[in-house]
Amino acid sequence: MNRHKQILSSIALLLSLFVTSAIAADADFAECRQIFPNSTPPVVHFQEDALPRALCFSGFALLHSGKSHTPIYVVERLNKQVLSNASKIKRKDRFYEEARLRAA
């Protein structure tokens, strides 16, 4: 009987993986498409309850999960000049909550 429960549990897990939604974040990242390779945000498959939120910043973009409160992905365009300039910036290690995200 225990083996039967394991099989049913595995089937339920597989079904939940197939019951996903896809987000083509084109509209959400309209302000920062230039950051993405080929100016095209990726299509991400996730469960609907991830509560995704697309955020554009001056140097990067991210798709944030409102459920786990973590990034689903982050993209930043880097080149030699950007990396060279970054090495001259002194870190302050000050982090702030993002006002555009839902409260936990």
Image (tube, rainbow, N blue to C red):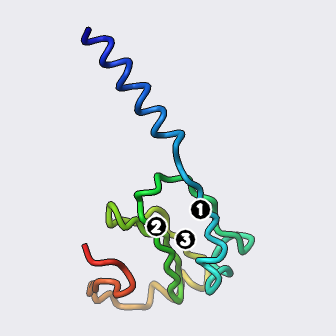
- The residue singled out by tag 2 in the image is 52
Amino acid tagged 3:
Val
Expressed as whole percent of the image width and height from the top left, the position of residue 2 reads 25, 12
* First reached walking from the N terminus: tag 3 or tag 1: 1
- Whether tag 2 and tag 1 are in contact, CB under 8 A, the answer is yes
Secondary structure state at the residue bearing disc 1: strand
Mark 2, other Cα within 10 Å: few <14 / some 14–19 / many ≥20: many
Q: Which residue is drawn at 27% across and 78% down?
A: 103
* First reached walking from the N terminus: tag 3 or tag 2: 2
- The residue singled out by tag 1 in the image is 23
Q: Which of 93 and 39 is in front in this view?
A: 39
Please state if 24 lies on the left or on the right of 100 as rendered. right
- The residue singled out by tag 3 in the image is 75
Secondary structure state at the residue bearing disc 3: strand
Expressed as whole percent of the image width and height from the top left, the position of residue 90 reads 35, 90
Amino acid tagged 1:
Ile
